[in-house]
Amino acid sequence: MKTKLFFSTLFTLIIWNVQAQMGVVALHKVGEVQYFSTSNAFILAYASAVTGDTIYLPGGTFTPPDIRKGIKIFGVGHYPDSTAATNATIINTHLNVGHEADGLHLEGLKIMGNLSFEANAASGISNVVVRRCFMQNITASGSNIHNNNLFSENVIQNISDLSAIQASGFYSNIIENRIHNIFLNIFENNVFIFHASVGYFAINNAQSSVFNNNVFENYGVSDGNANSFSNNLIGGTSALALGTNATSNSNFRIDPADTYLNETNQLFEYTDNFHLTETALSVQGDDGSQVGIYGGIFPYKEGAVPITPHISVKNIANTSNNQGKIEVEIEVHSQNR
């Protein structure tokens, strides 16, 4: 959908621009919408929200509240090319998720810190969805267990401790560094770009977890116990390191240099291209689709664009036309997934 808007007065345009620069945050409640445009707009919107509400964050940088409500929070994305018209939605520090946040949904955010599940929370946190976000780290430890959570199509630089997140699923994520303390979880169609080796594994201390249809850059996969590995594409020719009591079925080996169209330095970059080469595409996952992030039940969406309508073009004329009007061109695309 492409829309051109004309404003009769310069005043209206000035107000619109000031709001955009300030970062207008919208809170959608049942029957009403509230707007917040101060420097702590996200915090104010959260304070007014109740479980079931939705907060929309525009491009810009935001300081977050601690999240203890089951709300939905949508940003505009984090890839530079996909957010050229809006800028990325950046959370400028750790995002802490506490008890009573069951049903939380995060999408389209760039979290410059930890996504942290409250340690020793009063109760476990369940049914959290984290989708199409960038995170520097995920950490979840403590005595209460957080079950039935979903992480899909994210860029995750590090997972320092996942011991308190169990019976949860990780699908079609780009994972940069080693991940630690994995218990009773499912990892499907992820790419692990860390160049592991025996003694320095991509997965450190995994127990009773399932790894299907993933791509591992090298042979040092895991030092855990009682894990299942099926239809994974694993780089190198050295003997596999899958831990003790592992179940291995239809795992395939490949030269790491012949895996992706463009990924070279073990660090995530927005110029990386994780589409598989023709050689790698010859390997199928256990569901018949390709291995890696573009197969499976949650195939990676190009640019990690969130499901909300996406502004791809925003042009504002510097001067009025001969009718005294300012022309604003905004191109918005609806999203089917």
Image: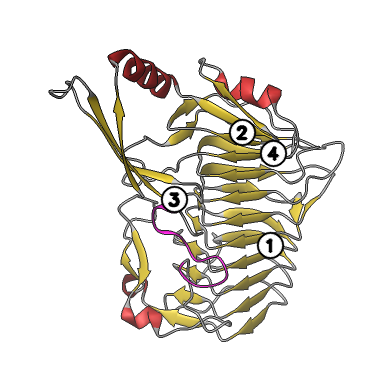
Q: Residue 172 versus residue 119: which sits nearer the camera?
A: 172
Highlighted range, magenta: 294-305
Q: How far apart are the alpha carbons under marks 3 and 4?
A: 20 Å
- Dot 1 amino acid type: Ala
Q: Is residue 165 above or below residue 137?
A: below
- Residue under the point 56% across and 68% down: 221
Q: How far apart are the alpha carbons under marks 4 and 1?
A: 31 Å
Total tally of numbered discs in the picture: 4
Q: Secondary structure at mark 2?
A: strand
| Residue 230 drawn at (x, y percent) | 60, 80
Q: Is residue 296 visible?
A: yes
Q: Residue 13 versus residue 105: which sits nearer the camera?
A: 13
Sequence order check, earlier mark of 3 and 2: 2
Circles 3 and 4: CB atoms closer than 8 Å: no
- Dot 3 amino acid type: Val
Specify whether residue 298 is painted magenta: yes
Q: How far apart are the alpha carbons under marks 3 and 1?
A: 31 Å
Sequence order check, earlier mark of 3 and 4: 4
Tell me the crowding category of disc 2: few under 14, some 14 to 19, or many 20 or more residues within 10 angstroms, Cα based.
Answer: many
Q: Residue 309 versus residue 324: which sits nearer the camera?
A: 324
Residue 211 falls left or right of residue 118: left
Q: Secondary structure at mark 1?
A: strand
Q: Nearer the viewer, mark 1 or mark 2?
A: 2
Q: Is residue 223 visible?
A: no
- Mark seen at residue 206: 1
Sequence order check, earlier mark of 1 and 2: 2
- Mark seen at residue 303: none
Reading the image, the residue beneath label 4 is 71
Tell me the crowding category of disc 4: few under 14, some 14 to 19, or many 20 or more residues within 10 angstroms, Cα based.
Answer: many
Tell me the crowding category of disc 3: few under 14, some 14 to 19, or many 20 or more residues within 10 angstroms, Cα based.
Answer: many
| Residue 220 drawn at (x, y percent) | 53, 68
Reading the image, the residue beneath label 3 is 305
